[in-house]
Amino acid sequence: MDNADTRRGKITIHKKWDRDTAILAGDHLIALSLKALNMTSSDNMKKIYDYYINSLSEVCEGQIYDKAFEKDKNVSIDDYIMMCRKKTSKLLESCTAIGAVIAGASDDDIESAVLYAENLGLAFQMQDDLLDIIGEEKNFGKKSGGDIREGKKTFLLLKAIELAGEDKDKNVLISVVNKEEVISEDSFVNLVRDIYLKYGVIEIANKIVEDYTKKADTALDKIKTDEGKKFIALVFKMILNRSH
């Protein structure tokens, strides 16, 4: 949906074939996921399916908000966080909850695991936005500055607009909001990156990633099963410690 030519360093399906093929591939993956889920041996299948269906719905809602925000000129930081909770956190929450249910975890441990996943999901999305503007293209796997080129209202952009003290800087940022043709140019992406650095937005975002991670760790500490706690922490460490 972001029209990227590459993802994780590989050519995207819509670019290699076409958009219809990409849509059908996504639909097929959903069918395969349901097939795999149906092979699960558990006495709590209704609870598992409830988590799965709810997350599938909310992820789609989050993506709808993400696309709608590209046209909406009045997106707030709270709107952005709400979208991230749906688009990213909810997926990680459901994966964690389903695993905990299958393992026979207590309701308290499931609740703590979900809270852990929610906060790391928010940290992950914020980190993803940061990598889009500061990550090395060869490591990130797609062209740098894609969010700016697409006119996305990320936390970085919204916070920079809030802090911009000079009219010329604010006008540059408003150009992204208005999706003017110039935003696709490499020189413009570099200009926006410089403004982010000028107003300390990169540092602020990094601090928020750190804060969400601390909240997640607090939730993790409440899980009573040491083996489960260590496994969840290991999986999320692999997710977050990335450069692409």
Image (cartoon, rainbow, N blue to C red):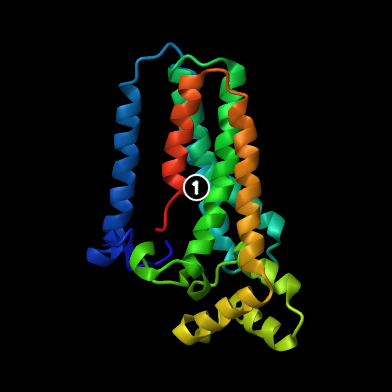
Residue 45: horizontal and vertical position, in percent? 43, 18
Q: Residue furthest left?
A: 17
Is residue 72 in sight in this rendering?
no
State the quadrant of the N terminus: bottom left
Is residue 112 in sight in this rendering?
yes
* Residue that badge 1 annotates: 60
**135 vs 113: above or below:** below
What secondary structure is found at the residue carrying circle 1? helix
Residue 96: horizontal and vertical position, in percent? 48, 31
Which residue shows up at 39% across the image and 71% down it?
Answer: 143
State the quadrant of the C terminus: bottom left
Which residue shows up at 62% across the image and 24% down it?
Answer: 222
Q: Which three-letter amino acid code belongs to the residue tagged 1? A: Cys
Residue 239: horizontal and vertical position, in percent? 43, 45
- Left/right placement of residue 97 relative to residue 78 reads left
**62 vs 77: above or below:** above
- Left/right placement of residue 5 relative to residue 166 reads left
Which residue shows up at 50% across the image and 20% down it?
Answer: 226
Residue 18: horizontal and vertical position, in percent? 26, 64
Q: Residue furthest right?
A: 165
